[in-house]
């Protein structure tokens, strides 16, 4: 009974259309928040996370959605090691429950948020047993949810989650290839006798190719046969002719990455004499495809703006394909520099650039915080940031400001609830022995 009351009070914190309910109930947790004041941000975050976790048990979908949003904000604002150490399994279980069929009637928004939360959880725990558990427990539900085309708006988040958990928790190339195959089937489904092929949207194609490339960037050598590569390069080459620029850019980066890894040359140079003739034929075909891709990149690097084309998007396309063309012709990979606080993170390969851009997109406003403090990402990019602030000089990030200073934040609702309780108690003391109790519904 006590646990249920706690869950009900936590749920009230995340009901956006009934703010009055927040002030009519009180919890010891909100009392503690107010006693500690506005200085202890981490304590507030722990309290918000605990209440959000309780709210994930609620039947009301909007309550679960708001709770998941608060969890994601908290994971972006700080590296939540303490919370994860205590509540890892519980959070993973709730998020997976949103993905699995029949457990709840989850909306596409809830599924997207739950997927993102799982990805944040994986990046927080880093390599190890917990990351392995996330991968093993999540791959099948993600695959099943991707196969369900009931609402395609959830698919980009599902793909990003699959990419992140494989990146962190996958232990060998076979598992990475498995996840890449799951992604590829989203735009190339295995058609049965009663299945009708549906033309994927530009956004869907871009999401698949970007997530697929992110995982490809982790592989040093490919054990696929040349026919598979021939089909994939041919498909990606076809995407360069599409009207949508985001599709072209994703396909161009994927093609540059494939040739950076040097897969096509390895099919020929590593071949055995008994298979040399067949392998050489495939190699020549792939080199022909490469020549076609180079010509396409040359055209896209100087493309003129058409009707309704955005100048910024056009310039991004031109710059990217100039880099790709330079890579194909001279072997130079692009070098980038990203400012991280007072430091600069350098990349010098297509693999590194694709990984950085994908993680920057996934983490959003939490990217800088994670690059400064997330040791897993330090290892990924061989990056050691300067420690600019002492422990006593913590600077509040944008995510923390939204979480703790917004008038509608969970923290401010809790503070309002506590102050109302304190006001009523003070009024009771002022009346002395003539004080009357205030009914809860009037509070």
Image (tube, helix red, strand yellow):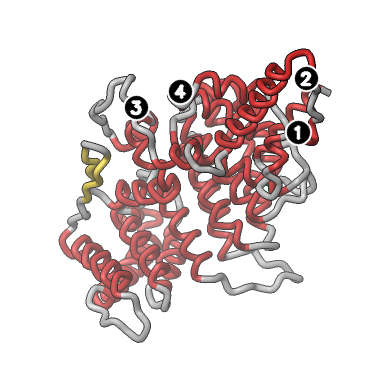
Badge 2 element: loop
Left or right, 17 with reference to 37: right
The image shows residue 326 at horizontal and vertical percentages of 18, 63
Badge 3 element: loop
Q: Name the residue under label 2.
A: 435
> 307 or 266: which is nearer to us?
307
State the count of labels. 4
Measure how far apart labels 4 and 2 are at the Cα level. 35 Å
Q: Earlier in the sequence, mark 2 or mark 3?
A: 3
Q: Looking at the image, which residue sits at the far bottom? A: 307
Q: Name the residue under label 1.
A: 8
Mark 2 crowd level (few <14, some 14–19, many ≥20, 10 Å Cα): few
Q: Name the residue under label 4.
A: 40
Q: Earlier in the sequence, mark 3 or mark 4?
A: 4
Which of the 4 quarters of the picture holds residue 325? Answer: bottom left
User: Residue placed at 65% from the left, 49% from the top?
Assistant: 110
Q: Looking at the image, which residue sits at the far top? A: 433
Mark 3 crowd level (few <14, some 14–19, many ≥20, 10 Å Cα): few
Measure how far apart labels 3 and 4 are at the Cα level. 10 Å
Which of the 4 quarters of the picture holds residue 35? Answer: top right
Q: Mark 3 points at which residue?
A: 394
User: Residue placed at 54% from the left, 56% from the top?
Assistant: 156
User: Residue placed at 74% from the left, 70% from the top?
Assistant: 193
Q: Residue 178 carries which label?
A: none
Badge 1 element: helix
């Amino acid at each position: 009974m006590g646990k249920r009351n706690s869950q009900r009070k936590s749920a009230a914190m995340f009901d956006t259309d009934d703010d009055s309910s927040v002030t009519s109930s009180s919890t010891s947790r909100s009392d503690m928040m107010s006693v500690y004041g506005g200085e202890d941000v981490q304590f507030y975050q722990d309290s918000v996370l605990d209440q959000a976790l309780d709210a994930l048990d609620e039947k009301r979908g909007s309550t679960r959605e708001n709770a998941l949003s608060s969890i994601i904000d908290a994971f972006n604002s700080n590296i939540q090691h303490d919370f994860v150490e205590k509540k890892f399994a519980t959070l993973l279980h709730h998020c997976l429950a949103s993905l699995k069929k029949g457990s709840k009637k989850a909306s596409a928004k809830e599924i997207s948020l739950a997927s993102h939360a799982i990805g944040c959880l994986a990046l927080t725990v880093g390599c190890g047993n917990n990351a392995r558990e996330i991968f093993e427990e999540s791959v099948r539900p993600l695959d099943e949810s991707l196969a369900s085309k009931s609402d395609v708006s959830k698919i980009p988040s599902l793909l990003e989650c699959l990419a992140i958990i494989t990146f962190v928790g996958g232990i060998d190339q076979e598992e990475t290839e498995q996840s890449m195959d799951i992604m590829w089937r989203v735009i190339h489904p295995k058609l049965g006798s009663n299945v009708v092929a549906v033309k994927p949207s530009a956004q869907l194609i871009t999401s698949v190719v970007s997530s697929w490339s992110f995982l490809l960037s982790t592989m040093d050598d490919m054990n696929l046969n040349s026919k598979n590569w021939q089909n994939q390069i041919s498909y990606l080459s076809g995407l360069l002719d599409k009207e949508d620029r985001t599709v072209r850019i994703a396909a161009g980066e994927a093609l540059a990455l494939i040739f950076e890894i040097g897969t096509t040359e390895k099919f020929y140079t590593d071949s055995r004499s008994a298979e040399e003739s067949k392998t050489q034929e495939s190699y020549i075909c792939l080199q022909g495809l490469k020549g076609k891709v180079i010509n396409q990149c040359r055209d896209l690097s100087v493309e003129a703006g058409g009707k309704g084309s955005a100048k910024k998007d056009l310039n991004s396309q031109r710059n990217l394909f100039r880099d790709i063309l330079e890579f194909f012709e001279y072997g130079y990979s692009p070098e980038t520099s990203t400012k991280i606080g007072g430091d600069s993170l350098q990349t010098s390969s297509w693999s590194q650039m694709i990984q950085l851009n994908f993680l920057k997109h996934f983490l959003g406003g939490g990217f800088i915080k994670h690059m400064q403090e997330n040791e897993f990402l330090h290892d990924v990019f061989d990056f050691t940031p300067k420690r600019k602030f002492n422990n006593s000089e913590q600077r509040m990030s944008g995510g923390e400001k939204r979480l703790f200073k917004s008038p509608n934040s969970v923290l401010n609702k809790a503070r309002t609830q506590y102050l109302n309780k304190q006001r009523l108690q003070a009024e009771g003391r002022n009346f002395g022995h003539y004080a009357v109790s205030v009914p809860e519904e009037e509070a």
